[in-house]
Amino acid sequence: MIRHDTGYARHTASESQFPAVFFLEQRGRRKICVATLIHPRWALTAAHCIEETALGATLAQGDRYPVRIAGREHFIDAVHLHPAYHNRYQSGIEDSDVDLALVRLSESLELPRPLPLYRGSDEVNKVITLLGWGYFGIGTQGLRDDDGRFRFARNTIDSANHRLRFTFDDPRLPDTRAVELEGLPGLGDSGGPALVQGQQGWQIMGIAVGELIEEETAGRQLGLYGAVGVYERISLHAEWIDQVIED
């Protein structure tokens, strides 16, 4: 989801620039859910993506799950859900649920290089880059189309508590915080990374889990200005990630 005044072409992302980022499933031209390599054999995604793609069912049958990473086919052979993940559609658990999963590849990859985790606690006011292949649209109209193209947008972290949150700001407002390529993840972008660029390159600060729907805006079109993006806060879960990989 992008600003209404920047044009689609400026938000086109290059898969060769972010080879560690890949989608989990394709249905026609539609691409669903995103994962990011954080280790030669491990990738990070949203836990609900295991349910919303064929990944979970495929592994449950004892088969490996194929994915394409940097243009080559590889296989996922195991999934580790965060112990605090329950079910995406279970109400009343939003403040304690952790929508994260680690997926294991059947073999270690020499390339592409994994992206490191962001481990600081100073996320607020950081400008992040969002990536995904999901639905796109503009802030004045909401969701429009799902063409399966890889896009990016940027935003500024408003709060960093249990999860990271940021607002899809309207650039027409006099007190706007909208950045030049302001945006929000679209439907299908779950599991996608929020990246921050430092002296050592890109780091993963968050993982997309959805758009916050307030009671007063329930039922309105998704992706409009004022919508709130919600990402799992990686700095809170780095210890769990490290432990799973080490074990």
Image: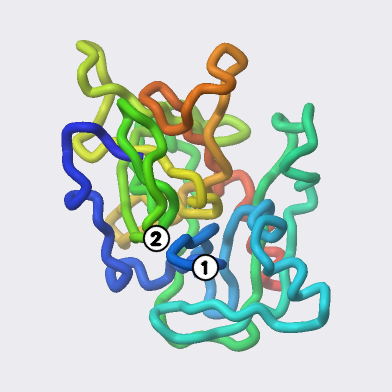
Q: Can you see residue 239? A: no
Label 2 or label 1, whichever comes before in sequence order:
1
Which residue is found at the position 30% from the left and 38% from the top? Answer: 2
Q: Which residue is mark 2?
A: 148
In the rendered image, residue 49, in percent from the top left (x then y), is placed at 64, 56
Mark 1 Cα shell of 10 Å, populated few (<14), some (14-19), many (≥20):
few
Does 43 sit left or right of 88 as displayed?
Answer: left
Does 111 sit left or right of 209 as displayed?
Answer: left
Q: Which residue is mark 1?
A: 26
Q: Can you see residue 183? A: yes
Tag 1 secondary structure:
strand
Using the image, determine if residue 87 lies above or below residue 40.
Answer: above
Q: Give residue 184's mark.
A: none
Q: Amino acid at mark 2?
A: Gly
Does 98 sit left or right of 189 as displayed?
Answer: right
Quadrant assignment, res 151: bottom left
Question: Circles 2 and 1: CB distance less than 8 Å?
Answer: yes
**In-front residue for pair 110/69:** 69
Does 157 sit left or right of 90 as displayed?
Answer: left
Q: Amino acid at mark 1?
A: Gln
Q: CA distance from mark 2 to mark 1?
A: 9 Å
